[in-house]
């Protein structure tokens, strides 16, 4: 340590706030033994205090605090309650996905074990047929519109049995069936029956 | 404590220091008030993300400085001078070096120092933060901060001495 090095270090010394900072310790000790350096340190400390006091004498506009407090934006709901809501949404979403996948798997298994059959008969708009017993060429236009718009479609076999027509799980076949509304066709598909209700998963449609 | 009251207490505790820091950086009272206000509004929206409540003060200074830098990028307002990277000769500092300069003169002289050096120097004089905290606020290594403060301080003292001399000669 010499006077110049001590000065370079003590140029940054601010007083008590820096007393616990070990970088100043040796230089401060050195200043105690060097009279000239001690005097320099006192002057620089005094000058530091003056500049600091002048900076701290600056006052903000009198209404600034009020203005800030009054204009405080309303924060969005965040924090733990928000995190909790997000976590709940994720859990619900994952659960729903798992249930849907299980259901879809069960359905696929059921269809996989279903019997493949050929059914020949008239393509029906099931809503009008069941509710109003409407079918045949005079109802063709309405049936086409209903099937195209998503109403369930069916086929009435020559033996009088009616099947609900579906596509692959999750895929609508209505657009295709609408072209055959009220017409007689042969459909190859997988038959499945539950509670006396018959369904045919369409694989191929042939117009007679 | 309600969120409103907490916010109000925080404003009353720190708005003066933030305003002074902002004024030293911008040289404009209106801009300093805007920066202070913006800093607290950012706190209102993002303050909850702060994990250590003890570092609120550093967080506020950091945010104000960041907002200032954004403004600087949009408009280079201060005709500031860069400081030679080599350590200049240490000046002999007369005790009364800053006595004659009022706050306005001091701010003007600070405004002539390059922003990279001005920000650490102002935080140094405000004595609110340790060197480590100043380094965190400015996102700079500790050594860089101390080096910049030392160079900027020499520059400031030289200019204050020149100002004193001019005032004496004017008499």
Image (spheres, rainbow, N blue to C red):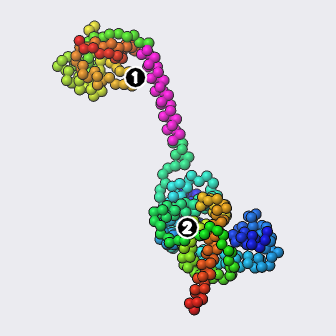
Q: Which mark is residue A100?
A: none
- Say whether residue A188 is visible: yes
Give me the residue at 66% from left, 72% from top. Answer: B88
Q: Position of residue B75 (x, y in %)?
A: 45, 65
Circle 1 or circle 2, nearest the eye: 2
Between A105 and B75, the residue placed more toward the observer is B75
Point 80% across, 79% down: residue: A35
Image height check: is A206 above or below B51?
Answer: above
> What are the residue bounds of the magenta stretch?
A86-112
Q: Nearer the viewer, residue B139 or A57?
A: B139
Gap between marks 1 and 2 measured at Cα: 66 Å
Query: What residue lies at 21% left-to-right and 24% top-to-bottom?
Result: A142
Query: Magenta part mainly helix, strand or loop?
Result: helix
Q: Badge 1 is on which residue?
A: A169
Asked if residue A16 can be seen in this view, the reply is no
Label 2 residue SS: helix
Whether the magenta-drawn stretch holds residue B16 is answered as no
Rendered image: mark on residue B115:
2
**Camera-side residue: B29 or B4?**
B29
Q: Position of residue B125 (x, y in %)?
A: 63, 71
């Amino acid at each position: 340590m010499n006077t110049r090095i001590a000065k370079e270090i003590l140029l940054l010394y601010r007083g008590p706030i820096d007393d616990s900072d070990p970088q100043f310790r040796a230089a401060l000790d050195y200043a105690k033994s060097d009279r000239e350096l001690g005097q320099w340190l006192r002057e620089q400390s005094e000058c530091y205090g003056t500049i600091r006091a002048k900076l701290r004498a600056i006052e903000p506009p009198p209404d600034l605090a009020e203005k800030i407090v009054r204009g405080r934006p309303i924060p969005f709901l965040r924090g733990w309650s928000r995190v909790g809501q997000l976590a709940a949404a994720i859990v619900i979403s994952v659960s729903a996905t798992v249930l849907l996948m299980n259901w879809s798997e069960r359905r696929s298994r059921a269809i996989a074990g279903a019997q493949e059959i050929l059914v020949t008969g008239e393509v029906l708009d099931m809503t009008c047929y069941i509710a109003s017993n409407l079918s045949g060429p005079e109802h063709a236009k309405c049936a086409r519109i209903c099937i195209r718009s998503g109403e369930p479609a069916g086929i009435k076999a020559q033996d009088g049995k009616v099947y609900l027509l579906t596509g692959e799980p999750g895929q609508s076949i209505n657009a295709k069936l609408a072209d055959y509304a009220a017409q007689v066709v042969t459909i190859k598909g997988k038959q499945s029956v539950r509670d006396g209700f018959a369904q045919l998963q369409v694989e191929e449609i042939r117009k007679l | 404590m309600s969120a409103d009251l907490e916010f109000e207490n925080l404003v009353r505790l720190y708005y003066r220091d933030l305003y002074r820091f902002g004024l030293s950086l911008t040289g404009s009272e209106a801009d300093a008030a805007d920066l202070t206000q913006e800093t607290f509004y950012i706190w209102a929206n993002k303050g909850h993300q702060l994990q250590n409540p003890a570092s609120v003060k550093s967080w506020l200074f950091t945010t104000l400085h960041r907002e200032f830098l954004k403004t600087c990028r949009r408009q280079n307002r201060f005709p500031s001078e860069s400081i030679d990277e080599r350590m200049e000769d240490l000046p002999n500092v007369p005790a009364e070096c800053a006595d004659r300069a009022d706050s306005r003169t001091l701010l003007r002289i600070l405004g002539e120092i390059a922003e990279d050096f001005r920000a650490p120097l102002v935080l140094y004089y405000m004595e609110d933060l340790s060197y480590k905290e100043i380094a965190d606020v400015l996102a700079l290594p500790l050594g860089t901060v101390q080096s910049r403060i030392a160079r900027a301080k020499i520059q400031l003292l030289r200019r204050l001495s020149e100002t004193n001399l001019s005032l004496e000669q004017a008499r």
